[in-house]
Amino acid sequence: MGLQYIQDQEGNTTGVIIPIDEWQCLKNKYAELQKEAVEDSSELITWQKKIIDERLKDYYDNSDKISDFDKTLDDFDRET
């Protein structure tokens, strides 16, 4: 198995990278991994959706305070 280990600045192993082909084989061999992967991905999607919903609400509630991106960059360039 071609694993890669991730270490922090002190040399402690903090993670591992598993090549995707090997990960797929492990998920096929151990059904619990597939279930956990699905649960983890749906949790992340819910977390991301909550942030997006909050930002969209803020955008619509404060649309009068929205600035054009290009104009903002031009203004910033003029200040520097």
Image: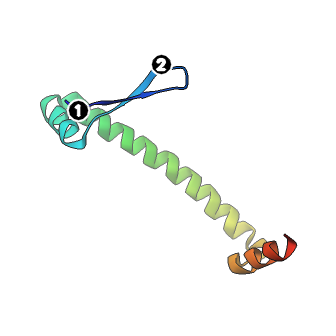
Tell me the quarter of the picture where residue 3 sits. top left
- Name the spot of residue 45 as percent of width and height, x first: 44, 49
Decide if residue 61 is on the left or right side of residue 21.
right
**Image disc number at residue 12:** 2
Callout 2: SS: loop
Tell me the number on the disc at residue 2. Answer: 1
Identify the image's colour scheme: rainbow, by chain, secondary structure or one colour: rainbow
Crowd rating for badge 1 (residues with CA inside 10 Å; few <14, some 14–19, many 20+): few
43 to the left or right of 66: left
> Disc 1 on helix, strand or loop?
loop
Residue 44 has which mark?
none
| Label 2 crowd bin: few (<14), some (14–19), many (20+), radius 10 Å | few
Q: Is residue 80 above or below residue 20?
A: below
Question: Which residue is at the front of the view, 31 or 1?
Answer: 1
Residue 9 in the image: state x and y as whole percent: 55, 25
Using the rendered view, name the quadrant where residue 56 is placed. Answer: bottom right
Mark 2 belongs to which amino acid?
Asn
30 displayed left or right of 66: left
Q: Quadrant of residue 75?
A: bottom right
Q: Residue at x 26, y 34 (%)?
A: 35
Q: Position of residue 60 (x, y in %)?
A: 68, 69
Residue drawn at 63 percent across, 56 percent down: 54
**Separation of marks 2 and 1 at Cα, in angstroms:** 19 Å
Which mark sits nearer the N-terminus, 2 or 1? 1
Depicted 26 relative to depicted 54: above or below? above
Q: Is residue 4 above or below residue 69?
A: above
Determine contact: label 2, label 1, CB under 8 Å.
no
